[in-house]
Amino acid sequence: MEKYAIRGLICVTAVLGILPLGGCLIYHRDVSYSGKGKPLSDSTLDQIECGTTTKDWVLATLGEPSYQSATANGTEILEYRYGKKLDNDFVFIPFVFINGENEDKQTVYFEISDGVVKNYWKETSKS
């Protein structure tokens, strides 16, 4: 019986010891974007037909690319980059601070030859 009384006393002491430490929970979330425009939806990409869709249509629809380059054979590569970063902060005063960062990245590439889209692909990553 004495063994159970000691355990009970320890539990009561622990609970009473924690009560004055009651704190405050603070949550903060920041969302920031990088790149031009917003991520390209699959419905927008579904409108593109390789061999038919023109570079002018891509530029009119998506705007100026993040990067543009030309290969040795004259093919152009248009690159649209987009990033969305979430920063979550949890603070439990007085003891705990947790910072969680998460970033979604999307890059869409268009291969243009003779003013027409020959190929395109989308790459996504999370970090």
Image: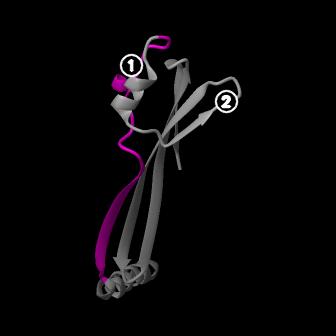
Q: Residue furthest right?
A: 72
Q: What residue is rendered at 30% in x and 72% in y?
A: 26
- Of labels 2 and 1, earlier in sequence is 1
Q: Nearer the viewer, residue 54 or 50?
A: 54
Q: x, y (%) of residue 74?
A: 64, 24
Q: Which mark is residue 71?
A: 2
For residue 116, above or below residue 8 = above
SS category of the residue bearing label 2: loop
User: Does the segment drawn in magenta span residue 26?
Assistant: yes
Residue count near mark 1 (Cα–Cα under 10 Å), binned few <14, some 14–19, many ≥20 = few
| Tag 2–tag 1 contact (CB < 8 Å) | no
Magenta stretch: give its range. 22-51
Please give the residue where the numbered disc 1 appears in the rendered image.
46
Q: What residue is rendered at 46% in x and 79% in y?
A: 3
Q: Nearer the viewer, residue 11 or 25?
A: 25
Three-letter amino acid code of the residue under disc 1: Asp
Q: What residue is rendered at 37% in x and 68% in y?
A: 90
Q: x, y (%) of residue 109?
A: 53, 31
Q: x, y (%) of residue 119?
A: 54, 19
> In which quarter of the view is residue 82 placed?
top left
